[in-house]
Amino acid sequence: MISENISNVRAAVTKLIRDEALGELLLYSLEVKKSCTIAIEGRKNMDFYDTDDETCDAEEYIRWKDARDIFFQSIKGSRLPLGFRIVLLAGKKLTMKVIAEADTVLKASDVASLGINIYYDRNGMRVTDGTSLKVFTMDKSLERSWDDYVKRLISGFEEEAG
C-alpha cells in the first residue's frame, strides 16, 4: 500500500480532469464538500440503458472519464471546496494486466478490487491505494505490482499544470 502526500494540488486536479489513463479507471464514489455535500455513487443503473451495446464493457461502475466533468463543475468557483474524496477502481482489463505484471498464481477471480483513494481537504491532498482479495495469500506480488502502477499513474500529480 502506498500513501503519498501531494503538494501541488492544482497540478493533481488538472491531471485528474485531463489524464486519459486515469479516465479509464472506474468511479466507485465521489464526494465534494462545499456549501453542501455532493455525493455520487459510480455503480451503473442498468435500467437506464436501452441496448446491450451501451453496456457492452460489462463493468459494474462508470468510467471516471464519464464523471470527471461533474467533478470539475462541482469544484470550480471562487472558493475552494472544503474537501473532496474520490475512490477509483481498476476495471477487469487493468486488473488482468496488473496480475500478469505481478507474475503471481492469483487469478482475476481472486481479486475483489484494486483501488485508489484520493482525499483533499484544506490541509492538503493524499493518495492511497489498496488491494482487496477474495482469498488469503502470503504472496504480496500483486500488491507490489498495483503499488508500482499507481506510482506511475500519479507521477504527474507533482508537475506544474500547463
Image (cartoon, rainbow, N blue to C red):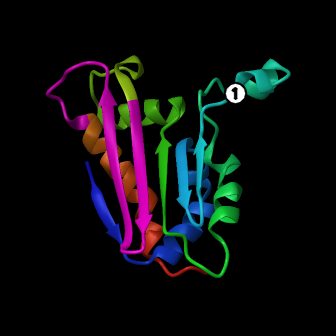
Q: Give the residue at mark 1.
A: 45
Q: Which residues are magenta?
A: 113-141
- Amino acid residing under circle 1: Asn
Residue 90 in the image: state x and y as whole percent.
Answer: 48, 38
Say above or below: 66 vs 42: below
Front in this rendered view, residue 43 or 35:
35
Q: Residue furthest right?
A: 50
Residue 91 in the image: state x and y as whole percent.
Answer: 53, 34
Q: Residue furthest front?
A: 35
Say above or below: 28 vs 4: above
Q: Residues within 10 Å of mark 1 (few under 14, many from 20)?
A: few
Q: Where, quadrant-wise, is the C terminus in this rendering? A: bottom right
Front in this rendered view, residue 13 or 34:
34
Identify the secondary structure beneath mark 1.
Answer: loop
Say above or below: 132 vs 27: above
Q: Is residue 119 magenta?
A: yes
